[in-house]
Image (tube, rainbow, N blue to C red):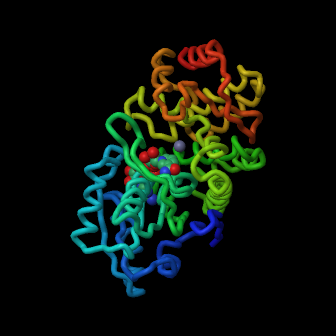
C-alpha cells in the first residue's frame, strides 16, 4: 500500500492506494468518530463490493447502514439526494455517523454533497471504484448534483477524511469505463508531467489489461498531481483550473450529444484533441505534439474527434459552461506536452477554425 496526503492544513487527509484495501477495515475504522457508518452505493457496485466492505467493518464492531441507489448520471439529482437524507434520518444517524461513498464519481459527488449538508456536515470517506473516481473525482472535495439546466450546478466544496483507492476493484469495470478513466489519466500527464506521458506511451496496453503494478503507478501519479494542485488552489481560483484541460470542449460535446451517449471521459478525450489543435493554431505547440496526443488517446481506445456538430452550436454550448468569466471564454491550452496555461486571449477566428476543422 502507498499513502499520499492532500495537504490542506487542518482538513488534510490521506489517500491510500493498493490492492484489496476494501477488506482492510482498520484503514477506515481509524478515521471514525463513532463506530457507525452509512455506506452509499448503487445497484451495480453493491453486489460486487458492498458485502466485502460491510463484513470487514462489522467484524470490527462497526454498525453499517447501507443506502443503495439506482445507477446512472441521471440519478445525480435532488430526488436521489433526498433518498440519502431520508435513510439517514430514518436510521437516526447523527453528526458523528460517517458517510462512506462506495462507487464511481456519481456516487462520490452525491454522497459527498449529502455529507456536506446533512446536519450541516458529517464525516465523509471516499472509496472510489472507477478509474476516473480514483484518479480524479474522489480527490479535492468537489461534491454536488446536476440541475435540469446544467451539470454539477448545485454543490459544495467538502473534503473527505480519507480516500481509499483499491485498485483490485478496477478489474470488474466495463472496458469502456476503464478507457474513459484513462482519458483523465492522460490529462494529468499532458498538463503537468511529460515524463508520465512517456510512461503512458510505454504502458497504455498494460493499463487496458488491468495490470496491477501499472494501475497502481498510474493511480498514484495522478493522485500526486491532483493532490498537489488542490493543495495549492482548493477553490479553483488559479492552477486548479488546469485540470479542466479538454473540458470546455468536452462539456459542450456532452451536452450537444445528450448526456449518456458518450461517457464523460470520451468527451474529454475528443475535447483534449480540440484543445491541442487550438494550442497549435495559437503557435504554442507543433503538429507533431498534437499527433502525439491523438496517438496516445487512440491507443487508450478513446475517440479523438467529435461527431459532426455545427461550430455555432458548439460556441453556444461553450458559452454556458461555468468556466467562462465575465462573458469571455477561457481555455486551458498546452504550452508543450506536460505543461499548460489558462488563456483568455484566443482570437474568435482561430477558435472558429479549430471548431470547423474538428467538425469537418
Ligand atoms: N468531483 C469531482 O471533482 C469530479 C471530477 C470528475 C468527474 N466527476 C463526476 O464523476 C461522474 C463520473 O464518474 P464515473 O466515470 O466514475 O461514472 P459512474 O459513477 O457513473 O461509474 C461508471 C459506471 O461504472 C459502474 N461501476 C463503478 N465501479 C465499478 C466497478 N468497480 N466494477 C464495475 N462497475 C463499476 C457504475 O455503477 C457506473 O455504471 C460525473 O458525474 C462527473 O461529473 C466529478
Ligand atoms: Zn473530467
Vertical relation: 96 (above or below) 184: below
Residue at image point 69% right, 47% down: 200
Vertical relation: 157 (above or below) 261: below
Residue at image point 57% right, 20% down: 358
Quadrant for the C terminus, please. top right
Q: Where residue 263 appears, x then y in whole percent?
A: 45, 40
The residue furthest left is: 90
On the picture, is 242 further left or further right than 265?
right
On the picture, is 331 further left or further right than 28?
right
Residue at image point 52% right, 69% down: 161
Is there any visible trace of residue 134 in the rendered image? no
Q: Where residue 182 appears, x then y in whole percent?
A: 58, 46
Vertical relation: 326 (above or below) 221: above
Is there any visible trace of residue 122 in the rendered image? yes
Q: Where residue 76 appears, x then y in whole percent?
A: 35, 48
Residue at image point 67% right, 53% down: 232
* Number of residue marks: 0
Q: Where residue 307 appears, x then y in whole percent?
A: 48, 23
On the picture, is 196 further left or further right than 211?
right
On the picture, is 297 further left or further right than 130?
right
Amino acid at each position: 500500500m502507498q499513502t499520499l496526503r492532500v495537504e490542506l492544513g487542518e482538513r488534510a487527509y490521506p489517500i491510500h492506494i493498493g490492492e484489496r484495501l476494501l477488506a482492510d477495515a482498520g484503514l477506515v475504522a481509524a478515521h471514525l468518530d463513532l463506530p457507525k457508518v452509512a455506506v452509499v452505493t448503487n445497484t451495480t457496485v453493491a453486489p460486487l463490493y458492498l458485502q466485502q466492505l460491510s463484513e470487514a467493518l462489522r467484524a470490527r464492531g462497526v454498525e453499517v447502514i447501507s443506502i443503495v441507489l439506482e445507477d446512472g448520471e441521471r440519478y445525480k439529482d435532488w430526488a436521489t439526494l433526498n433518498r440519502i437524507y431520508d435513510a439517514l434520518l430514518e436510521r437516526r444517524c447523527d453528526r458523528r455517523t460517517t458517510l462512506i461513498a462506495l462507487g464511481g464519481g456519481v456516487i462520490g459527488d452525491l454522497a459527498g454533497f449529502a455529507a456536506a449538508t446533512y446536519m450541516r456536515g458529517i464525516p465523509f470517506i471516499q472509496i472510489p471504484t472507477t478509474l476516473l473516481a480514483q484518479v480524479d473525482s474522489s480527490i479535492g472535495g468537489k461534491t454536488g448534483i446536476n440541475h435540469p439546466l446544467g451539470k454539477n450546478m448545485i454543490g459544495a466544496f467538502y473534503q473527505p477524511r480519507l480516500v481509499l483507492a483499491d485498485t483490485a476493484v478496477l478489474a470488474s469495470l466495463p472496458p469502456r469505463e476503464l478507457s474513459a478513466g484513462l482519458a483523465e489519466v492522460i490529462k494529468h500527464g499532458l498538463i503537468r508531467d511529460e515524463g508520465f506521458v512517456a510512461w503512458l506511451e510505454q504502458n497504455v496496453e498494460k493499463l487496458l489489461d488491468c495490470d496491477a503494478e501499472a494501475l497502481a503507478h498510474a493511480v498514484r501519479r495522478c493522485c500526486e498531481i491532483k493532490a498537489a494542485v488542490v493543495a495549492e488552489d482548493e477553490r479553483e481560483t488559479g492552477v486548479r483550473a488546469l485540470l479542466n484541460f479538454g473540458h470546455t470542449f468536452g462539456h459542450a460535446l456532452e451536452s450537444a450529444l445528450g448526456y449518456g451517449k458518450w461517457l464523460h471521459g470520451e468527451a474529454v478525450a475528443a475535447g483534449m484533441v480540440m484543445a491541442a489543435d487550438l494550442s497549435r493554431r495559437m503557435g504554442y505547440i507543433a503538429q507533431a505534439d498534437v499527433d502525439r496526443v491523438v496517438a496516445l488517446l487512440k491507443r487508450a481506445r478513446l475517440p479523438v474527434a467529435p461527431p459532426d456538430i455545427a461550430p455555432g452550436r458548439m460556441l453556444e454550448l461553450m458559452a454556458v459552461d461555468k468556466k467562462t468569466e465575465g462573458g469571455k471564454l477561457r481555455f486551458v491550452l498546452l504550452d508543450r506536452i506536460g505543461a499548460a496555461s489558462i488563456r483568455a486571449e484566443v482570437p474568435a477566428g482561430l477558435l472558429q477554425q479549430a471548431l470547423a476543422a474538428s467538425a469537418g
